[in-house]
Amino acid sequence: MQTVITKMLGIEHPIVQGGMQWVGRAELVAAVSNAGALGTLTGLTQPTPEALRSEIERVKSMTDRPFAVNLTLLPSLKPIPYDEYRAAIIESGVKIVETAGNNPSAHMPAFKAAGITVIHKCTTARHALKAQQIGVDIVSIDGFECAGHVGEDDIPGLILIPATVAQLSIPVIASGGFGDGRGLVAALALGAEGINMGTRFMCTKEAPIHDKIKQAIVDGNETGTTLILRSLRNSSRVARTALSESIIDMEKQGMGIEQIGPHVSGLKGRGVYEVGDTEGGIWSVGMVQGLIGDIPSCAELVHRIVADAESLIEGRLSRLCKTAAAA
Ligand SMILES: Cc1cc2nc3c(=O)[nH]c(=O)nc-3n(C[C@H](O)[C@H](O)[C@H](O)COP(=O)(O)O)c2cc1C
């Protein structure tokens, strides 16, 4: 299945694995890229720019296929040396970058000078349009279903994807809520050139997280997520747990980041994946967990999605057209 993005990114299938804090490490990235999709290393999962350079080398030792590095531009209590992370990406010879969060304009001249293809991930059509204006190559548009930062507009993919495609001249990748062949066909029908998945790739054999978290996703359903930090205009979709419910209560009581911050700390979130305790910290997961029922390898997953999408298009959908034509 060839689309504009398979050609632009040099990949076999129109499927991208989005950056995932603590999850997007070399093992997963290489497995996704070796499966013919695009793996994405999460830059800020590495504690220093130097560590990111080593992690990029680890990916290169495991795959000779294209892969990306995610640079998430979000406000942080501790200042992040973004310019040094950017230099690590460029000097390591990475050719695809996924930016997300704030406007990446400060980084664009350096990325463009290095011949890097920039995918900017955002949650509104107006941010997508802005990203196109500042010269990104591809937009990844994250619907309200998505794991992690959903933005504040709450527009689900069914509307957000075609609304964004209609306003942009650059290719759009559909993100949020995708996990199977039906989703891929739907994304293509809505005008996207491929899909970006987070939660589904978390639940694969190669994802470097505790099996108990993968099993919690398999056991969970589409109602098992909730939004925290809405009161701070930093809404994030996470697993619905006693801890995340208690954060929402703190928000209702009017508490600010000083009181809430320690409970949502990234380090506690990392512990969830290491120890497998779903209540040990806040962890991101999307509504698509309601469609996830197994823990395949990345190769099995990618091939299944493409095969199911092709048979859906060539089978049921084309039969519907033939039936309509014959009537
Ligand atoms: C555990 C987890 C961590 C994530 N961390 C990041 C991140 O650090 N930066 C980012 O841009 N997106 C992050 N995301 C969002 C994904 O890249 C992707 O946009 C999102 O998962 C798509 O929605 P889906 O989970 O329904 O597929 C994260 C998602 C998950 C599941």
Image (cartoon, rainbow, N blue to C red):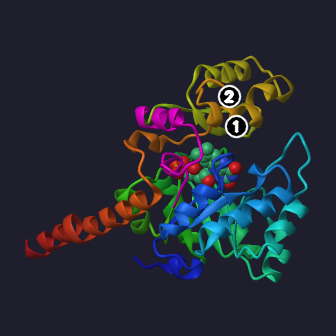
Give the x, y percent position of residue 313.
27, 69
Alpha carbon separation for disc pair 1 and 2 = 8 Å
Residue 326 in the image: state x and y as whole percent.
8, 75
Task: Please say if 103 is above or below 224.
Answer: below
Q: For the residue marked with disc 1, what is the amino acid?
A: Arg
Q: Nearer the viewer, residue 164 or 308?
A: 308
Q: Secondary structure at mark 2?
A: loop
Circle 1 SS class: helix
Residue 147 is at least partly visible in this image: no
- The residue identified by callout 2 is 281
Q: Are marks 1 and 2 in contact (CB under 8 Å)?
A: yes
Q: Quadrant of the C terminus?
A: bottom left
The residue at 80%/75% (across/down) is 111
Region rendered in magenta: 196-220
x and y percent of residue 155 in the render? 55, 49
- Which numbered disc flags the more N-terminal residue, 1 or 2? 1
Q: Which of 316/305 is in front?
A: 305
- Establish if 202 lies above or below 195: above
Tell me the residue that label 1 is attached to: 270
Q: Is residue 310 magenta?
A: no
Q: Amino acid at mark 2?
A: Gly
Query: Which residue is rendered at x = 79% and y = 80% of the image?
Result: 112
Give the number of marks. Answer: 2
> Is 225 displayed left or right of 45 in the figure?
left
User: In the displayed image of the protein, which residue is found farthest to the front?
Assistant: 61
